[in-house]
Amino acid sequence: MKINLFKSVLAASLVAATLASCQSEPEVGSTLYPTAEENYSAKAYLYTGSSDGNKLTLAGVKSSTAITLSGDSALFYVRLSAPAEKDVTVTLAASSDGVTARSGEEVMSTEAISLSKTTVSIAKGQQETTEPVVVKLVNGDALKNLTMLKNGVTSVVIKSVDGAETAKTNTKIVVATDFTFDNINASGTLNTAKQIALTDYTMSSPNTNSDATKLNDGNNNSYIYSYVFYEPEFVMEFKSTKTVSGVGILCNYTSYGYGVKKVAVYTSEDGKTWVNMGTASASATYDDNTPFPVVFNSPVTCKYVKVKVLESFSTEKYPRYLIGEMYAYE
């Protein structure tokens, strides 16, 4: 009797265990550890086609008194990650919220830009607006109030989406100015009383066969002599940040036309991001003892100054230049 009872209990236990095992094992083809269901619905995002990610740069020339705009507009599209199941409406807005300024930039007012439209539609079955949205600089107080020698930055964002979802990324476009600054005083004079010591900076050049260390060795008879068409560049690197009011370029053999006539000048705080100060031109020839003056309208706080030779007074078929020394002034 006891044996039969034991067999009955054992059989019942085995059946229960088998049923429990069958219930807990996943079916063939099912996920062992269930995951959240993927969401493949259409999501709206912004697309610029720019190699610089979702960033647009708008150009112009800025002086201490005026702004001239050129290349001051760019376009972008509103897209969906999948074809729309119904008509989609996307609202856009300029916004400075969360905008970060890099070296040489400052966050500017949203009034510095305009949008050709702030509401766009994407038709059912489509993934992109039929026409782009144009963002353009506005030549007004918002741009004029930017600190001289600083570029401005703001953004355009997706404000709302009706008929689809908003994507988690690419919902903001950074819009920045890329000004050339007219910071050259054509009639200015160098403050020779505040010349920066030659030992306070080093000279370098990316051009081959140009020993730029000759340009601050105190000897005008050790010089760099080459052709203008190489577009030679020379970089001053100060030991510490300086407030620079101008640069002097001392040439040699100026009677042969080897004096520099026109240069482009750039400044930088880190040696990577350069700000174009404009171009300086000499209206008349000068002698070997007179530096060609490059005077800034507004002194520039920087650690680097780059000078690019554009023209000399040479009338040769292939004009040459000759620079002996390069000075800097506070």
Image: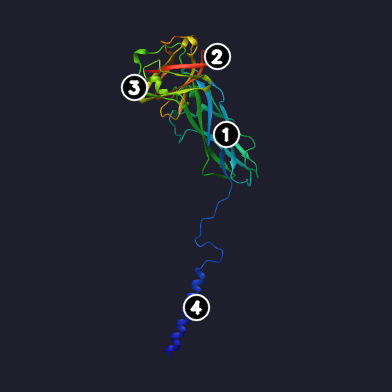
Q: Quadrant of residue 328?
A: top left
Q: Which mark is residue 199?
A: 3
**Is there any visible trace of residue 215 in the rendered image?**
yes
> Which of pointers 4 and 1 lies earlier in the amino acid sequence?
4
Q: Secondary structure at mark 3?
A: helix
Q: CA distance from mark 4 to mark 3?
A: 94 Å
Q: Which is nearer the N-term, disc 4 or disc 3?
A: 4
Does label 3 or label 1 sit earlier along the sequence?
Answer: 1
Residue 153, how many percent across, how many down?
48, 30
Whole-number angstrom distance, CA of label 3 to CA of label 2: 36 Å
Q: Nearer the viewer, mark 3 or mark 2?
A: 2
**Residues at marks 4 and 2, CA–CA distance in whole angstroms:** 105 Å
Residue 286 coordinates in the image, percent (x, y): 45, 9
Mark 2 Cα-neighbour bin, 10 Å: few <14, some 14–19, many ≥20: few
The amino acid at mark 1 is Thr
On residue 249, the disc is: none
The residue labelled by disc 1 is 118
Q: Quadrant of the C terminus?
A: top left
Specify the amino acid type for callout 2: Glu
How far apart are labels 1 and 2 at the CA level?
A: 57 Å
Task: Kindly identify which residue carries mark 4.
Answer: 15
